[in-house]
Image (spheres, rainbow, N blue to C red):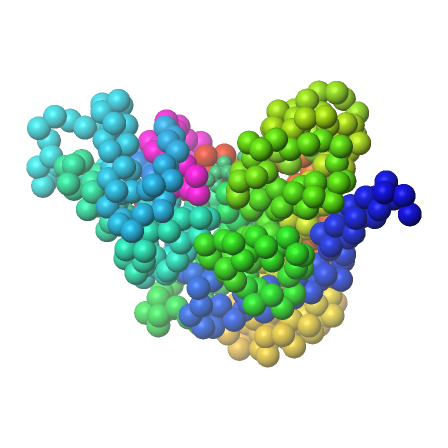
Amino acid sequence: MSSHDNHQSLVHDILQQFDIDSDDVSKVTQRFLRQLQEGLDHPRPWQLPSYVYHVPDGSEKGTFLAVDLGGTNCRICLVDLLGNSTYNVTQTKQTVPEHLRINPRYQPLFSFIAKALREFLDRHKLRPENDCSAGARRIPLGFTFSFTCEQTSISKGTLIQWDKGWDIPEALGKDPCAMLQESIDEMELPVQVSALANDSVGTLLSRAYTSQEQGSTLAGVIIGTGTNAAYIEKVCNVQRLPRPERKRTHDSIVLNTEWGCFDDDLEVLPITSFDRALDASSINPRQQQLEKRVSGMYLGELMRLVILHCHEQGVFNMILGEESPCNRPYGLDSSFLSLLAKDKAAESLGVASAIERVLSAQGSTLRDARVLAQLADGIVRRSARLAGSALGAIIIQSGRLSDTQSEKGTVQVTSLQTHRHRSQRPKHFGRGCGLLSRIVGWLKRSIPSSTGPRNVEDKPLSRGSEQDIIDIGVDGSLIQLYPGFEAHMRSALRDIQEIGPDGERKVRMGLAKDGSGVGAALMANAAKLS
Ligand code: ADP
């Protein structure tokens, strides 16, 4: 074999390792579905109740502040909900310096946020002078805190673990709202932290607020620095909720899946030598395994490890300079993968020079560019298909497909059977959860559809009708900016037996614009109602 053939086969072998076929997708979905159901019954660091029982319908009104602490940035927003599915938002963004993200003490981080908040209030004249008395009106603030918290109410929670490269040990076990309020009070700002919001919960709420088809939004999905999703579950399915909460009159609750930690014991997730190396040198080995294969923080690093390996094996013509970001852990940003995807054919000279610039490389050829584009595509394709597999588990768990199918008289018995087998007890019979509704659900499916609808809800649904749509709000730079990310997610949805092409067509994904800011405002509004 010539060295050219050897290099071809090495690249081919790497691409094979990153490939996940339809069987793999199904296995991942089934495993995630089991974890979703396990998290409903038992306290686990996933399926965390948000204590949001009120999903917005667009009529919400009020002025709120929001702080969004993402994986990379801290955004401060002033949100005016106008009550007609629209809003005004004014915001400012700062990158959180690394010495605050990794620090033994929590106070420096929260002082940084409070200081940024003070500047924001001053700039927008929201801090009346001499009006910091105890009785002064405080502006309610929703705090979007995108790390794993076990919430005990809409405004209180306990930080369980850091991820996305953050590490502030003193904050573990503490309430993020209380830590932020402490710094706000020290600066005597007229602000009350009234809701603890997760970014995926916020994404769901803001999408529901702006959605034209009321009631169609099922989930919010984040694929940015990290990855996570929230969805609407029936309260009676959530056995882990404390009894008084289950006795409330609400039907639905928003759950924060924290899916980044799914399959941490690696039962089904694909593992390449690059995944192993990334995991071993991460600050949280054996944790956040889905996140490490899906999110923006890690895709650049996987690409860097792959490039180094290929470079060592002489696959490329280009020479990486000593100062190349490839020589520094996490030196390569995942936006580099988008840059390669934008020019998939890699025929332009522009991409070769962009590669040289980003990688501090010399002598790159069009063939190098083509190989890099193939490798990037393999890594992102796997990421998007895994995200699609996880979304598929949520869609199946929600019962939205079987509800619709049963009303159409085309129930997929196989899916219900596998469902039953997996959970030992059926979770979705008709729309309710009690024994009576199970019987009603069984009857509904047994009666031929020609019996006709008995009430408005039972009307057969046509494709594209409001109830037919499964609306998913999405946010995060990777899903927004990587060309074809959604298409890959959709290919995975089609591969899942219970969803298939028909189910996939019902799924509408759309950007939840200003998701975390507007979402946090809606959480603060929900806090008033709870
Ligand atoms: P956060 O999750 O911190 O709120 P973002 O949603 O902007 O912020 O996500 C930032 C992540 O997205 C970073 O990991 C970055 O590498 C990645 N990213 C930014 N731009 C792009 C792009 N064009 N293509 C792919 N990934 C990108």
Q: Is residue 339 left or right of residue 207?
A: right
Residue depicted at 65% across the width and 65% down the height: 268
Asked if residue 183 is positioned above or below residue 399 in the image, the reply reads above
> Is residue 228 in view from this perspective?
yes
- Would you say residue 90 sits in the magenta stretch? yes
Q: Main secondary structure of the magenta part?
A: strand
Give the position of the C terminus as an image quadrant. bottom left
Residue depicted at 81% across the width and 44% down the height: 7
Q: Picture quarter containing residue 306?
A: top right
**Where does the magenta region start and end?**
68-91
* Percent coordinates x, y for residue 399 in the rendering: 60, 62
Residue depicted at 53% across the width and 77% down the height: 435
- Would you say residue 373 sits in the magenta stretch? no
* Percent coordinates x, y for residue 62 in the rendering: 31, 36
* Percent coordinates x, y for residue 144 in the rendering: 37, 45
Q: Nearer the viewer, residue 416 or 306?
A: 306
- Furthest residue toward right: 1
- Furthest residue toward front: 322
What is the count of numbered marks?
Answer: 0
Q: Nearer the viewer, residue 378 or 76?
A: 378
Asked if residue 123 is positioned above or below residue 10 in the image, the reply reads above
Q: Is residue 163 left or right of residue 24?
A: left
Q: Nearer the viewer, residue 524 or 332?
A: 332
Asked if residue 479 is positioned above or below residue 503 in the image, the reply reads above
Q: Nearer the viewer, residue 382 or 90?
A: 382
> Is residue 171 in view from this perspective?
no
Residue depicted at 63% across the width and 46% down the height: 305
* Percent coordinates x, y for residue 234 in the rendering: 49, 63
Q: Is residue 184 left or right of residue 306?
A: left
